Image: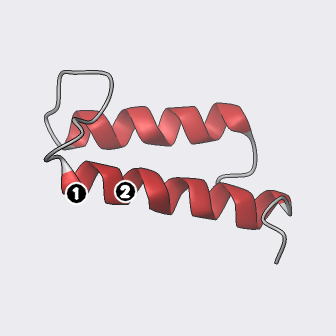
């Protein structure tokens, strides 16, 4: 459960490592899976912290 910024950062870093990516940011073109995972992690963070406006 991602309920704070530290946990969010840790999950994002582990996703990057699991995908075997060595750069720090996704490319503008390409890296669609990585960008999708980032969006999912931020969505979970905002839903769990109540900052999503839902």
Residue occupied by mark 2: 37
Residues under numbered marks 1 and 2 in contact, where contact means CB atoms less than 8 Å apart: yes
Asked whether residue 49 is in view, the answer is yes
Q: What is the crowding at mark 2: few (fewer than 14 residues within 10 Å), some, or many (at least 20)?
A: some
Please identify the quadrant where the C terminus is shown. bottom right
Residue occupied by mark 1: 33
- How far apart, in angstroms, are the residues tagged by discs 1 and 2? 6 Å
Residue at x 16% of width, y 44% of height: 29
Taking 51 as reference, is 5 above or below it? Answer: above
Residue 50 placed where, x, y %? Answer: 86, 63
Q: What secondary structure is found at the residue carrying circle 2?
A: helix
Taking 49 as reference, is 14 above or below it? Answer: above
Q: What secondary structure is found at the residue carrying circle 1?
A: helix
Lateral position of residue 24 relative to residue 6, left or right: left
Asked whether residue 1 is in view, the answer is no
Residue 18 placed where, x, y %? Answer: 22, 42
Residue 4 placed where, x, y %? Answer: 75, 42
Q: What is the crowding at mark 1: few (fewer than 14 residues within 10 Å), some, or many (at least 20)?
A: few
Taking 36 as reference, is 22 above or below it? Answer: above
Residue 43 placed where, x, y %? Answer: 60, 63
């Amino acid at each position: 459960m991602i309920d704070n910024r530290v946990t969010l950062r840790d999950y994002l870093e582990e996703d990057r490592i699991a995908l075997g990516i060595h750069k720090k940011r996704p490319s503008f073109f390409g890296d669609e899976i990585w960008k999708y995972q980032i969006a999912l992690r931020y969505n979970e963070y905002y839903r769990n912290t109540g900052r999503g406006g839902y």
